[in-house]
Amino acid sequence: MLQASSAGASSATNPVVKWFGPESMNRVVIGHSFSATSERSMDAHEHVYLEGNTQTHVYLVLSGVVGTYKLLADGRRQIVAFSYPGDMLGLDHPELYTNSAEALCKVRVRCIPINAIDRLMLEEPGFGQTLLRMASHELAETRDQLLSLGRKSAMEKLATFLLHVSRRNNYAGNPENTLYLPMKRCDIADFLGLTIETVSRNFTRLKTAGIIQLVSNSEIKVVRQLDLEAVADGVTTN
Amino acid sequence: MLQASSAGASSATNPVVKWFGPESMNRVVIGHSFSATSERSMDAHEHVYLEGNTQTHVYLVLSGVVGTYKLLADGRRQIVAFSYPGDMLGLDHPELYTNSAEALCKVRVRCIPINAIDRLMLEEPGFGQTLLRMASHELAETRDQLLSLGRKSAMEKLATFLLHVSRRNNYAGNPENTLYLPMKRCDIADFLGLTIETVSRNFTRLKTAGIIQLVSNSEIKVVRQLDLEAVADGVTTN
DNA sequence: CGGGTTTTTGAATTTTATCAATGGCTGTGG
DNA sequence: CCACAGCCATTGATAAAATTCAAAAACCCG
């Protein structure tokens, strides 16, 4: 049995390498304000924070995967991001969180008080840039998601999602081409703006086309990566 | 004839008040690096920058409205943001712009070289916070848009969009409840992930329901604001 | 006023959602 | 160890929403 938390477990010994340097952020945070930050371990379905609550901390995911979502009055849900180790959570405009964040599996996060962030921004040269780069990167990813939701078909959305997970899952120790999906079908559906039935049907279509294999509910194998990319980009004739 | 540029014209004398203080950013930028920044006037359909180009500047909209968009290989387009006076453009992760930005009407922007941003982040205490708050705010808006695209019906999307414009348009000198839409139906469609036909049909439905009036193609009047809000939130029985 | 563009409206089609079962895995208790 | 219960995921049939294709109407600018 494999959970996404294994990604985090490995990140302790095999740090996830990321272009913009959240690792360096963690180093800075730990180095300069260790006493003010703490770690928190959470089980699946626990909330990191809730929309509408007063913002107290920013969180850095250390292991596991967190889902960030917004709700409509009638219960419709949109997951706005899946956060992997190295990702930051809860950096909202002052006062209140504008979304809720829920652990999708066992998760560890570092809790950084807001005032520590403010202090570091002033004291530590380069910390502001790191934070801004992380925010810009997050914004770019969210805009990619906007393109998916607004203009891609269900099939294209799912393929895009799998490639997205593939990029985040791609760390040392992972069996070649195998993706672990810590989230359920309903989470994928709420991320892609689809129903679980549509997600399921399109998983089946990809399997039938020989592009992926469904090893188990939470484990898939990408058999033909290039075809998957073609589907994701809508460059396909069928 | 009214263009959105009038918003900008008025912003010179009646500054748009915004909670997070882009005005203060403009003041800081002008105060400390005036020689390095310049203003640029543009006509409708001119591009501020193009996706894939090397990032040279960050832009602050002074007047008019700019549309930021991404394209798929086959030409499908998703507008990811409409930027009004006081909004910032082009703050992408290093190197290349990840989207294109096009003037939707006559536009004035302040051009701030990237290295000026980096320098100010180090030299000016508080500048980093301002920038980060602006980025966080942008992220929050983009996530709201994600909720619209993923989980709202065409009708709800359109109502949400009108309220969104309403909030940005709401400055001194505007006739009460009147919205000016500097963008065409196809821009609205590309923002909401719909076709122009669907947008048009739903404008008509709102008109027929007596919630709005279509004064001209680029001007609408909100007759029943509360009903519009109810539609936007999906709290409606029909 | 006139011509080109943009928007609206209509009919048919496609895509996705909804409703309804069925199938399969997992973990537990006899 | 097996049987069963509960949760997920898949599959199927039908319905609803939005798109596509095709005109017609309205608008805007010179």
Image (cartoon, coloured by chain):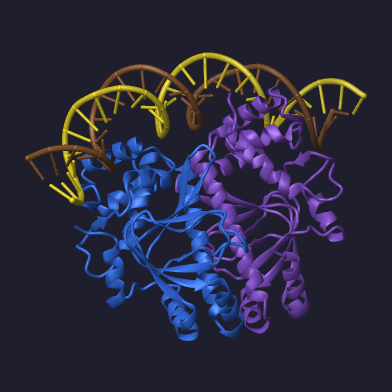
Chain colours: A purple, B blue, C brown, D yellow
Q: Quadrant of residue A74?
A: top left
- Residue name at image x 85 percent, y 54 percent: A10
Q: Is residue A36 left or right of residue B126?
A: right
- Nearer-the-camera pick, A227 or B95: B95
- Nearer-the-camera pick, B210 or B169: B169
Q: Residue B169: image x %, image y %?
A: 30, 62
- For the C terminus of chain B, the quadrant is top left
Q: Residue A223: image x %, image y %?
A: 76, 31
- Does B235 appear above or below A24? above
- Residue name at image x 78 percent, y 59 percent: A17
Q: Is residue B82 visible?
A: yes
- Does C11 appear above or below B232? above
Q: Is residue A95 visible?
A: no
- Does B216 appear above or below A237? below
- Nearer-the-camera pick, B124 or A205: B124
Q: Quadrant of residue C5?
A: top left
Q: Residue B230: image x %, image y %?
A: 34, 49
- Residue name at image x 45 percent, y 47 percent: B148
Q: Is residue B164 left or right of residue A232?
A: left
- Does B99 appear above or below C17? below
- Nearer-the-camera pick, A90 or B161: B161
Q: How many numbered circles does the render carry?
A: 0
